[in-house]
Structures are given as C-alpha cells and as structure tokens.
Image (spheres, rainbow, N blue to C red):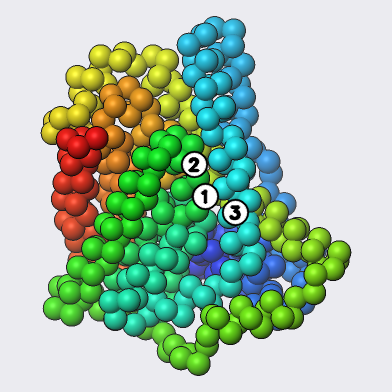
Amino acid sequence: MQMKMDKTDPICGMQGHMKAHGHYFCSENCIKKYEKQNKIKHCFSCDVRGGHKPWYKERLYVVSLITVAAFVIAYFFSEKLFDAFIEYFALIWWAILLGLFIGGIIDYLIPNEYISKYLSNSKKRTIFYSVIFGFLMSACSHGILAIAIELYKKGASIPSVIAFLLASPWANLPITILLFSFFGAKAFLLIISAIVIAIITGLVYQVLEKKKMIEQSKHIASVDSSFSIRKDIKKRWKEYSFNYENNIKTLKGVLRGSWALAKMVVWWILIGMILASFARAFVPHEFFIQYMGATLLGLVITLILATIIEVCSEGSAPLAFEIFNQTSAFGNSFTFLMAGVSTDYTEIGLIWSNIGKKTAIWLPIITVPQIIVLGYLFNVLL
C-alpha cells in the first residue's frame, strides 16, 4: 500500500497544493522563501505543479463574491442588514489594511531563525520567548496551529508550542489592531489577558512535562548557542543598501507577504462580519440580554457557543464585538474570543494526532477555568 505524501508546507505549515522541490507549498511566496533558505535558483515555470489554482477554488475570492452578493441583496431587501454591513466595513477596513501591511513586514523582514532558536529548551524563559514570538506572527488561529505543529516537528518543546499557540491568535500585531478598532482601550485587557493565560498555561505544561504527565518532546533540536539575534540584525542593517532597486524589492516582498496573509485570513474576517451583521439585524436584543448577558449562565452559554462555532480568530472578533454591543458584557466577549482557541475541536484534534492525546486533553482543562474566572471578573468589575 502506497503511503500518502505529506502535503504540509515546509515554510508556513499550512496544507500545500503547489508541488515544487519535493514538497507541497500553499503559495508562490512560500516557494520563494524555501528557495531563499536553501539557496535554490528560482524556476517557477519549470519547477511548480499546481501553481495555477482556479479562482473558484480560492476561498478569498469565493467568500468575497458571497459578501458582495449579500451586500447587494441587503441593499434592495433589508435596510437593517445593509446598515449593519456598512457599520462593520466602516469600523474595520483600516484595521484590516494596516494589519495586513504590518503582517507583510513581519513576514518578509523577520527570519524564521529568530523564532526557532529560543523555543527548544525547558527553561521558564522559553515560555516568555514563545509568547513574544507569537506576538510577531501574522496568521489566523488555524494558520497558527499549522505553524505551531511545524515548530514542534522542528524541535520546539511542547510547553513552548502550547504557549505560542495560545498567544498568537489574540496577541499578534494584526489582530491587536483589529481588536482596538472594535473595543477601543478595552482591547488592552484582551491582549494582556491572552498573554497571561498563555504564560500560565505554558508554565503548567512545563510542570506536567517534568512529571511525565504529558508526552515527552520527540523532536528536540540542537540549538546554535553562538547565534545572536542582535548581531544578526546589525549585520543585516550594515549589509542593506538603501537604494531604489533594493527598496522596491523590499516593498514587493512586503506586499507579497501581505497578500499571502490576506488569502489566509481575510475570508475568515468576511465570514465573521457577515455572521455579526446578520446577528445585529435579525437576532432580537432580548435574546442577547436573556441568554448571553453578564451572568454566570450567560458566560457558560457563550463558552458553549464559542466551542461549537468553527470560526477563525479574525472571524470571531466581529462576533465577540456584537455580543459586547448587545449586552455590554465584556467578560462574555473575552470568553468567546479565548474559548474559541482553547476549546476548538479542530485544534484539539490536531494536537491529539500530531503531539499526543495527553497534551490535547490538558489544554481545555488548564485554560477553561482561567477563561471563566477572568470573564466573570470582567463582567463584575467593568
């Protein structure tokens, strides 16, 4: 029986469809990164199979068309829905563009070596490194999951992978900007809380690993202790020549990274915006107050909904804001956002199959109590 070839993109960890250099890649951008890392001469026309993906198989294009169709239909048949669409577009368009541009800068200018170097040992500071690098990542929760699994395969320890996984969807720069566009200054509380939960959970996982209550890391990498990020930055800065040709090349690289990120996350944002607009237009205000208000029952119902609804982090943000907009229960919005990462069945399933069942089972056991406590405190104090 022939083994099915692994189609995981070796650069971003996503599912690939373009065959090149003995691997599958999700985009031409990732192929170029792979060639740059391995010093391979680029030959896109002769190397790549499956590079010309039909537009109707691109999720961004399909969801964009659905969004435009819904927008046009709403204009003629539902004033409430149309107004909800307009309000959300006005609220988030600038945040999306700014987030994508920053994501492109991170994607093009921050080498993977910076992230991989500090994630393999068992020291407590590794967890803090994981959270910092999670902040520098630019992908949705599903994309971050793929990257986290790939980091594990390349030698990152299990606790650092879990901390990275929890911090990235809500503490990365593009989403930080999106959350501020929705929640204003209160977004600080969301970001700080996500970081705190990621750190606490990572440290608990380190204890579990020492006591052998979870799987032991199988892919610990040898770390080049002589590598210095500070020296590497100085070297790159010194070698970079600020001329027209290099600046254009850098700008193109940043825009390629932004476009790759857009194809990964914008369709999720559009789905979230559509769902939130429908909720604002058609779900009675009384329903939110009765079942999702600032009570313990409302908190539990929100937690259950976040577990069931399979929406990426960018898609969850508009829905979480709508919960806050309807109920003023900030703790419920926080719970909806964080629980979507901690209790997502796709995420737990992939951790189960790639790292181990004990690691997967402990994730909701450790995170859910923290989320409920913080959510309850937010409802009481704010």
Secondary structure, mark 1, is helix
Q: Counting other residues with Cα less than 10 Å from the Cα at mark 1, is it few (<14), some (14-19), or many (20 or more)?
A: many
Q: Is residue 174 above or below residue 38?
A: above
Q: Which quarter of the figure has residue 164?
A: bottom left
Q: Amino acid at mark 1?
A: Pro
Instruction: Identify the mark at residue 150; answer none if there is no mark.
Output: none
Q: Is residue 22 above or below residue 137?
A: below
Image quadrant where one finds the N terminus: bottom left
Q: Amino acid at mark 3?
A: Ile
N-terminal of the two: label 1 or label 3? 3
The answer to which of 58 and 378 lies nearer the viewer is 378
Circles 2, 1 touching at the beta carbon (< 8 Å): yes
Q: Amino acid at mark 2?
A: Leu
- Residues at marks 3 and 2, CA–CA distance in whole angstroms: 12 Å
Q: Give the residue number, with chain letter if any, for mark 1.
A: 174
Residue 57 appears in the rendering:
no
The location of residue 85, given as percent across then percent down, is 53, 22
Q: Which quarter of the figure has residue 327?
A: top left
Specify whether 86 is left or right of 354: right
- Count of picture labels: 3
Q: Give the residue number, with chain letter if any, for mark 3.
A: 102
Secondary structure, mark 3, is helix
Q: Give the residue number, with chain letter if any, for mark 2.
A: 178
Q: Counting other residues with Cα less than 10 Å from the Cα at mark 3, is it few (<14), some (14-19), or many (20 or more)?
A: many
- Residue at 44%, 88% in the rendered image: 223
Circles 1, 3 touching at the beta carbon (< 8 Å): yes
- Residue at 18%, 80% in the rendered image: 210
N-terminal of the two: label 3 or label 2? 3
Circles 3, 2 touching at the beta carbon (< 8 Å): no
